[in-house]
Image (cartoon, grey):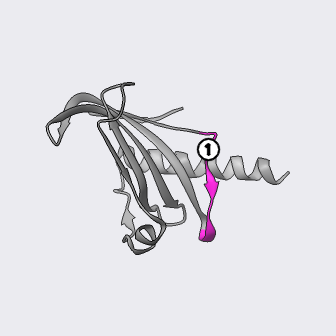
Amino acid sequence: MLVARDANYNISIDTSRSIRRALGGYVVWYRTDHIGTHLHNGKPFNREVVQSLVRCDSLLFKVISVDMSLGARAPISQQRTEPDELFEQPWRRVERGTAEEMAAQAGCTFAARQYAVKRR
């Protein structure tokens, strides 16, 4: 579901795969489609699929995984965080007033709804 857009990219969330974590946090999947093509280690990409751990009370997040690709093609880069690395990774703050903030809030809203439905 498309949840945020600006001049540089469109951000969507996967509303079906959220997982509730302790302290009000959720694992949320985001897909960012960049308007322009970028390079990562000399390889072009315009799509990122990111799995994040988001603390909804403060909009702090940690990155669990990132896949970069050129559209729907095979990933040019895949980054994974091991559980101990995730624990040690510092929390980052979502920048206020940005498309990322809209995406984080939407991810939290849909994850909370999904969890509430699962509990019924």
Q: Which residues are magenta?
A: 15-23
Q: Amino acid at mark 1?
A: Arg
Vertical relation: 120 (above or below) 42: below
Residue 19 drawn in magenta: yes
Residue sitting farthest toward the bottom: 88
Residue plotted at (76% across, 52% down): 116
Vertical relation: 9 (above or below) 54: above
Residue 39 drawn in magenta: no
Q: Quadrant of the N terminus?
A: top right
Query: Residue 6 location, x and y as percent?
Result: 32, 34
Q: Mark 1 = which residue?
A: 17
Residue sitting farthest toward the left: 42
Vertical relation: 90 (above or below) 20: below
Query: Residue 51 location, x and y as percent?
Result: 47, 49
Residue sitting farthest toward the top: 72
Residue 7 in view, yes or no: no
Query: Residue 45 location, x and y as percent?
Result: 26, 32
Residue sitting farthest toward the right: 120
Observer-nearest of 62 and 9: 62
